[in-house]
């Protein structure tokens, strides 16, 4: 066997050491660069919509994709669901005594319960604009409709009664909650019910309660508005209410429109599953300056609300369709 001299062994050791010394800085540079990228992605996840820094569009796009695709772990979803069930049961118990409390206590109960729903689902509520105060008389809120979450975020920000389709009153759990919370139910298949509902809304407004209507008549995915029907806005004209247009928008952690929050085709269970999968949802609620309704007609109010909400959301105004007496909100 060939013998290696001590001098040859030292040369080989020095060669390996030099190779290690050359690789080590590259390895450390790789670690530091990866750390910076992870820190950047974490910052985007933590603080939401951040504009792409000049010169780093690729990193920004990668980080957006990572957090757009990221879903909550199964165990987290199960914990959220369990907490949600307990919270709903608590709401059912509270709703039994809800009709017997004063208006101020009712509003506090409604706000706290709705805020609890948002906390459990990790939905952060951001409100802008001027909200109706306790002293504001006869406030009618007109909002675009995206999801069943709309009811929760509006209640958390500004306790109000809602107009909903009559079918909901027969739903298990939600029907019981809605009836006890004072929801006004409308039968969509009966034209005569429009007059009755306008009278009911007017009476509620005159008693000092707020009412929220969704004049689109159905939900959308948040990327476009549908035509605003004027059927249920006659009550605002009759009692000279203040009409507050309210723009609703949901965004994911990347700052994009959160289509998973929309309630369109899937069942309520499937919609809840999609929402539970989101790491976080930012709900944006924009209250536009109100308008007095006494000297307006219902069609003018519908067009005003439509334009105000479209402007707040930076969306095009929907195609104008002729009004029909049978145009009734779906929820």
Image (cartoon, grey):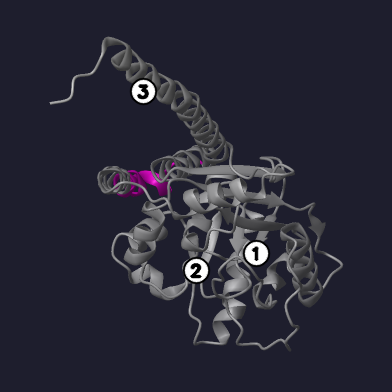
Q: Quadrant of residue 272?
A: bottom left
Inspect this view and state whether residue 253 appears. Answer: no
- Please give the residue where the numbered disc 1 appears in the rendered image: 202
- Residue 31: x and y in percent read 47, 29
Q: Could you tell me which residue is drawn at 71 percent across and 42 percent down? A: 53
- Please give the residue where the numbered disc 3 appears in the rendered image: 16
Q: Is residue 117 left or right of residue 200?
A: left
- Residue 318: x and y in percent read 73, 77
Q: CA distance from mark 3 to mark 2?
A: 77 Å
In the image, residue 314 lies in the stretch drawn in magenta: no
Q: Residues within 10 Å of mark 3 (few under 14, many from 20)?
A: few
Q: Which mark is residue 117?
A: none
Q: Of discs 2 and 1, which sits in the foreground?
A: 2
Q: Earlier in the sequence, mark 3 or mark 2?
A: 3
In the image, residue 96 lies in the stretch drawn in magenta: yes
Q: Earlier in the sequence, mark 2 or mark 1?
A: 2
- Please give the residue where the numbered disc 2 appears in the rendered image: 164
Q: Which residues are magenta?
A: 91-102
Q: Could you tell me which residue is drawn at 57 percent across and 85 percent down? A: 192
Q: Is residue 288 left or right of residue 7?
A: right
State the SS at label 2.
Answer: strand
Outermost residue to the top? 6
């Amino acid at each position: 066997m060939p013998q290696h001299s001590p001098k040859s062994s030292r040369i080989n050791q020095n060669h390996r050491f030099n190779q290690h010394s050359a690789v080590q800085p590259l390895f450390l540079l790789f670690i530091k660069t990866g750390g910076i990228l992870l820190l950047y992605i974490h910052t985007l996840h933590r603080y939401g919509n951040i504009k792409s820094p000049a010169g780093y569009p690729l990193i920004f796009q990668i980080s957006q994709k990572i957090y757009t695709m990221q879903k909550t772990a199964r165990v987290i979803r199960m914990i959220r669901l369990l907490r949600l069930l307990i919270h709903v049961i608590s709401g059912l118990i509270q709703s039994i005594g809800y009709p017997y409390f004063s208006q101020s206590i009712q509003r506090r109960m409604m706000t706290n319960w709705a805020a609890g729903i948002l906390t459990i689902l990790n939905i952060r509520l951001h409100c802008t604009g001027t909200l109706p105060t306790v002293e504001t008389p006869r406030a009618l809120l007109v909002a675009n409709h995206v999801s069943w979450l709309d009811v929760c975020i509006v209640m958390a920000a500004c306790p109000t009664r809602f107009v909903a389709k009559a079918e909901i009153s027969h739903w298990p759990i939600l029907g019981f909650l809605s009836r006890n919370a004072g929801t006004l139910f409308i039968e969509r298949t009966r034209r005569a019910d429009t007059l009755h509902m306008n009278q009911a809304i007017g009476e509620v407004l005159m008693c000092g309660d707020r009412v929220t209507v969704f004049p689109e008549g159905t939900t959308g995915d948040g990327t476009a508005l549908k035509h605003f029907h004027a059927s249920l806005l006659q009550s605002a004209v009759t009692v000279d209410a203040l009409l507050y247009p309210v723009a609703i928008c949901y965004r994911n952690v990347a700052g994009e429109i959160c289509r998973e929050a929309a309630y369109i085709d899937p069942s309520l269970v499937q919609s809840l599953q999609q929402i539970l999968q989101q790491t976080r949802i930012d709900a944006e609620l924009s209250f536009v300056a109100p308008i007095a309704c006494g000297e307006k007609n219902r069609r003018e109010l519908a067009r005003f609300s439509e334009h105000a909400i479209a402007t707040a959301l930076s969306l095009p105004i929907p195609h104008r369709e002729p009004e029909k007496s049978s145009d009734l909100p779906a929820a």
